[in-house]
Amino acid sequence: MAKLRIIDTKDRFLVEVDGTEIPYVTTYELTRTVGDIVLLKLALSVIDPEVEIETDKVNIRKQEGTT
């Protein structure tokens, strides 16, 4: 089981999964589904990132501006 920690106060904002802080998070959406599965959607704000995607899936669409 993973440990999810979110601090979202006027003084501090932090998203952490299993003790590792997730940087650059600007917004999040948390949804609990049937069967107690928790879905966490994150929006990240990163200026000019170097993007590397490794996948074996066939239907990957490249976003404009990514390599």
Image (spheres, rainbow, N blue to C red):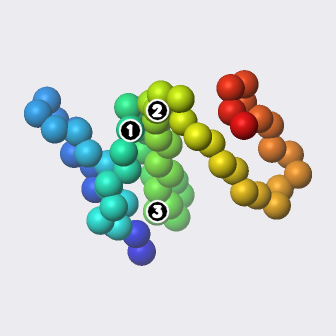
Please indicate whether residue 42 sits to the left or right of residue 15 in the image.
Answer: right
Q: Residue at x 32, y 48 (%)?
A: 15
Q: Are marks 2 and 3 in contact (CB under 8 Å)?
A: no
The one nearer the camera, 67 or 10, is 67
Q: Earlier in the sequence, mark 3 or mark 1?
A: 1
- Residue 41 in picture, x, y percent from top left: 50, 43
Q: Are marks 2 and 1 in contact (CB under 8 Å)?
A: yes
SS at mark 1 in the image: loop
Relative to residue 57, is residue 27 depicted above or below?
above
**Disc 3 marks which residue?**
36
Quadrant containing the N terminus is bottom left
Q: Residue at x 72, y 57 (%)?
A: 54
Relative to residue 4, is residue 45 depicted above or below?
above
Circle 2: is it few (<14), some (14-19), or many (20+) Cα within 10 Å?
Answer: few
**Disc 1 marks which residue?**
24
- Residue 27 in picture, x, y percent from top left: 39, 32
Using the rendered view, name the quadrant where residue 26 is placed: top left
Whole-Å distance between the Cαs marked 2 and 3? 31 Å
Whole-Å distance between the Cαs marked 2 and 1? 6 Å
Please indicate whether residue 29 sits to the left or right of residue 48 in the image.
Answer: left
The one nearer the camera, 50 or 26, is 50
Please indicate whether residue 47 sits to the left or right of residue 7 in the image.
Answer: right
- Residue 46 in picture, x, y percent from top left: 46, 32
Q: At label 3, which amino acid type do we have?
A: Asp
Q: At label 2, which amino acid type do we have?
A: Val
SS at mark 3 in the image: loop
Circle 1: is it few (<14), some (14-19), or many (20+) Cα within 10 Å?
Answer: some
Instruction: Choose mark 2 or mark 3, whichever is in front.
Output: 2
**Disc 2 marks which residue?**
46
